[in-house]
Image: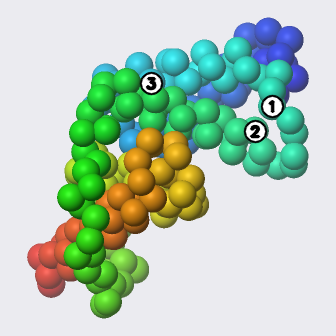
Amino acid sequence: MAEGIRKGDNQAMRDFYAQFGGLLTAACSRYVVNDDDVKDVMQDAMVSIIQNIDSFTYHGKGSLRAWATRIVVNQALNFLKSRKRLQDTFADKDIGNISCADDEPDVGMVPEEVIHDMISRLPEGYRVVFNLYAIEGKSHKEIAEALGIKADSSASQYHRARNMLAREIRKYKQEQT
């Protein structure tokens, strides 16, 4: 498929979008919550994927998906940074007094779409750091470099997001019983 895109084959591009469009849109939506903004970011990401396909190197099954996902996530982060809202969500005052949820709730009976909704309702800074750390597997140092913040701010935002999610999960489970 990548080879077809390299050659400018429109069918290869349609096939790519048919196979990965939903997954890539979901990845974008983890960071950008407004539907119109998601569409804009995805448009820019798809253009970037097509323009940069020559930098893709096949490393086995799933490598095209992983490569494209990184582009979408970077595009979403650039979008958030460009609006200057992201930087405003991180403050050194968030560092310290981080309380960790010792008794994390069991998410086994909570539907996946409910968890995704809870994550999407986190404050922007919390949501971005949570996704980068918990979903993308980035270290706090890598997150700090990507977002232009301190590693301690990243850790603080992550722990606060995790605590907020734990409260929301407990609340959801209580409402279901």
Kindly state the secondary structure of the residue where label 3 is placed.
Answer: helix
Mark 3 crowd level (few <14, some 14–19, many ≥20, 10 Å Cα) = many
> Label 2: how many residues lie within 10 Å, few (<14), some (14-19) or many (20+)?
some
Which quadrant would the C terminus be assigned to in this image? bottom left
- Going from N to C along the chain, the mark reached first, 1 or 3, is 3
Residue drawn at x 66%, y 23% as measured from the top left: 49
Apparent side of residue 176 relative to residue 48 in the rendered image (left or right): left
Quadrant in which residue 65 is drawn: top right
Q: Which residue is mark 2?
A: 64
**Where's residue 8, x and y in %?**
79, 9
Indicate the quadrant where residue 67 lies. top right
Asked if residue 149 can be seen in this view, the reply is yes
Q: Find residue 33 and report its horizontal and vertical position in percent.
A: 30, 38
For residue 171, side relative to residue 112 (left or right)? left
Q: Is residue 156 above or below residue 64?
A: below
Q: Mark 2 or 1, which is nearer the eye?
A: 1
Residue 123 image position (x, y, % from top left)? 23, 50
Tell me whether circle 2 and circle 1 mark residues in contact (CB < 8 Å): yes
Q: Is residue 13 visible?
A: no
CA gap between label 2 and label 3 equals: 19 Å
Residue in the image at 29% along x and 83% along y: 101
User: Are the two marked residues, 1 and 3, in contact with CB atoms closer than 8 angstroms?
Assistant: no
The residue to which callout 3 is attached is 41
165 over 149 or under it: above or below: below
Of callouts 2 and 1, the N-terminal one: 1
Q: What secondary structure is marked by label 2?
A: helix
Whole-number angstrom distance, CA of label 1 to CA of label 3? 20 Å
Quadrant location, the N terminus: top right
Asked whether 151 or 34 is in front, the reply is 151
